[in-house]
């Protein structure tokens, strides 16, 4: 009998130690060596471990699939915030996301005396789940000693749940969260300035109200500012689908900038920067006086993450041309005149995916128009000539088709030969020839 009891004790003790080992392994993996960064709180790691123990909607950034019998309700809810609110509400506020950083970024170490930061988040009638997921992800994936506070600036929201319910929720969080209320609708810039004026941190970080931060997002940004306090830094902006809330990694081979018309664009990293970095993609990318680095792209005292992000973001799309079949968008890819137009994951942040459908029935990006001179394409970008012809596309808002008038063919998704370039094919009504022109502008 004694031997039996003894065996039970040994087996129970062994099982407990196995569970402890598994937990510690996951903890240190999630915290990214946080014991060296003065962040000894087990709460973020515990939440991360718990979230990985089941296949809940959206975990590890996976797409949320809405059942067919809920599709109509989903479409109605979509109108509220211009994204799939039903999918968002199904996802945990602390959902897990994959770590897509380069291996070299994962092993980087940072000084212990990085400056701390105040995060400013402006919102107006934001959805509960996206706003709270932004806050929770920032708290859970930021070293505690670096995150001093979060300031929420309410730009005159009208929704009841953003009043007392929000106030009651944020007081339960382990990081101080303050809510500032604008007396009247003032716009993003004035609201951000109001928040910035009230911060106490050494660095101000601006986040959109619908983003999700990934592990390791903050330290590289603050490290760049520690090196040069005049720096303005910004992360690589990844994508969260407004339709499925799927997380999709962005490219570290592009950087953001403005053209001479002050339109924001993504540009490929120039060869001179590739040569300067000698192939090390974890080193900063310089863009004029701005700098980018690692997974977070860097450029100050102000860090701006916008879009559905890398430090991650869900954002509504604007002026985009989205294919119904693939859920991808027409994209100019930063290419020049007489080059083929591209096709890429919709990121909802404008930039290279901003197009205007003009009164002349042109599809225009800056001063270039989509043009096709022969059957089956290719579709290239040429200077807009306002003479219709090869640049004339008729959009049918009911069938969702873009008819190239001269060829009498429809714009279609890319072929197997070149999956990055839309093409023209005989009109058939299939989904690959259906395009949603969201928030398209009609310009003269």
Image (cartoon, grey):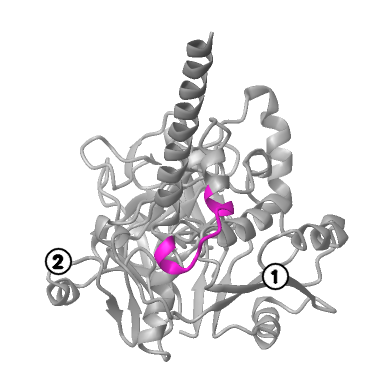
Q: Is residue 429 visible?
A: no
Alpha-carbon neighbours of circle 1 within 10 Å: few (<14), some, or many (≥20)? some
Which quarter shows the N terminus?
A: top right
Across and down, in percent, residue 107 comes to 28, 60
Apparent side of residue 197 relative to residue 387 in the rendered image (left or right): right
Query: Of helix, strand and loop, which one carries label 1?
Result: loop
Across and down, in percent, residue 370 comes to 36, 57
The answer to which of marks 2 and 1 sits earlier in the sequence is 1
* Direction top: furthest residue: 1
**Residue 176 image label:** 1
Residue at left offset 63%, top offset 60%: 135
Range covered by the magenta-colored residues: 35-45
**Residue 52 image label:** none
Query: Of helix, strand and loop, which one carries label 2?
Result: loop
Q: Nearer the viewer, mark 2 or mark 1?
A: 1
* Direction bottom: furthest residue: 230
Taking depth in this image into account, of 245 and 266 the one nearest to the observer is 245
Which quarter shows the C terminus?
A: bottom right
From what the image shows, is residue 115 above or below residue 378? below
């Amino acid at each position: 009998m004694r031997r039996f009891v003894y065996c039970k004790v040994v087996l129970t003790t062994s099982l407990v130690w196995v569970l402890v080992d598994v937990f510690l392994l996951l903890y240190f993996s999630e915290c990214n060596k946080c014991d060296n960064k003065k962040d000894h709180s087990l709460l973020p790691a515990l939440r991360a471990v718990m979230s990985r123990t089941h296949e809940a909607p959206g975990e590890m950034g996976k797409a949320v699939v809405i059942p067919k019998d809920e599709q109509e309700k989903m479409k109605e809810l979509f109108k509220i915030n211009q994204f799939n609110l039903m999918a968002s509400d199904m996802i945990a506020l602390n959902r897990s996301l994959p770590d897509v950083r380069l291996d070299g970024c994962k092993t980087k170490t940072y000084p212990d005396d990085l400056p701390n930061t105040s995060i400013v988040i402006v919102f107006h009638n934001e959805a509960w789940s996206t706003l709270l997921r932004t806050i929770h992800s920032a708290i859970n994936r930021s070293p505690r000693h670096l995150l001093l506070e979060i300031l929420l600036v309410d730009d005159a929201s009208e929704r009841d749940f953003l009043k007392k319910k929000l106030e009651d929720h944020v007081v339960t969080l382990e990081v101080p969260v303050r809510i500032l209320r604008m007396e009247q609708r003032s716009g993003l810039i004035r609201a951000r300035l109001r928040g910035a004026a009230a911060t106490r941190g050494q660095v101000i970080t601006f986040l959109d109200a619908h983003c999700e931060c990934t592990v390791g997002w903050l330290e590289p940004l603050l490290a760049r500012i520690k090196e040069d306090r005049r720096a303005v830094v910004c992360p690589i902006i990844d994508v969260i689908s407004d339709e499925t809330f799927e997380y999709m990694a962005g490219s570290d081979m592009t950087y953001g900038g403005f053209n001479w018309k002050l339109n924001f664009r993504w540009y490929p990293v120039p060869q001179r920067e590739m040569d300067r970095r000698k192939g090390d993609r974890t080193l900063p990318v310089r863009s004029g006086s701005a700098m980018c680095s690692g997974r977070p792209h860097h450029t100050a005292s102000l860090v701006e993450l916008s879009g559905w992000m890398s430090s991650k973001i869900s954002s509504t799309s604007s002026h985009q041309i989205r294919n119904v079949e693939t859920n991808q968008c027409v994209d100019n890819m930063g290419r020049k005149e007489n080059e083929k137009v591209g096709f890429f994951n919709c990121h909802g942040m404008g930039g290279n995916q901003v197009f205007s459908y003009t009164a002349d029935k042109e599809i225009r990006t800056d001063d270039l128009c989509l043009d096709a001179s022969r059957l089956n394409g290719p579709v290239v970008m040429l200077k807009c000539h306002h003479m219709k012809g090869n640049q004339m596309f008729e959009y049918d808002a009911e069938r969702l088709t873009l008819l190239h008038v001269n060829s009498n063919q429809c714009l279609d998704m890319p072929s197997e030969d070149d999956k990055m370039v839309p093409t023209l094919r005989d009109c058939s009504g299939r989904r690959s020839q259906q395009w949603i022109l969201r928030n398209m502008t009609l310009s003269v």
